[in-house]
Image (tube, grey):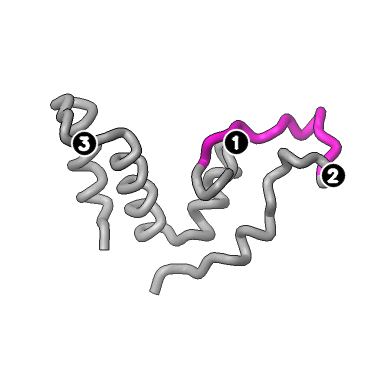
Amino acid sequence: MITLLDGVKMAYRKHHLDDPSIGWDELSDVLHLALCNEMGDRAFLEWLEEIGFFPSVGRPTQRAPDLAESDAPDDPNWPDRDLLDTFDEPA
């Protein structure tokens, strides 16, 4: 299991030490897993919604639509809140 300490150490190596052996996608995956392991998948997705991002193909890659200008839920860019029900909390 990847821990928060693992994620922080890898982020430090990539960002501060400019370690070329760590790719950006690898770092992103490790941080994602570390956060999910610590807070749970549901809380992670709720946090993404809170900060204005939502999962797209399993990763937060797109800014959430402006709620005032959206015709949600018919808007195809609207976050799928049913995703929140597909994840379990950590044991």
Q: Quadrant of the N terminus?
A: bottom left
Name the amino acid, label 3: Ile
The residue at the point 57 percent across, 51 percent down is 46
Q: Which residue is mark 1?
A: 52
Name the amino acid, label 1: Gly
The residue at the point 60 percent across, 31 percent down is 63
Q: Which residue is mark 3?
A: 22
**Where is 91 relative to 58, above or below?**
below
Mark before the other along the chain sequence, 3 or 2: 3
Q: Which residue is mark 2?
A: 74
Res. 34 mark: none
**Where is 63 relative to 34, above or below?**
above
Q: How many marks?
A: 3
Q: Is residue 28 magenta?
A: no
Name the amino acid, label 2: Asp
CA neighbours of label 1 inside 10 A, class few (<14), some (14 to 19), many (20+): some
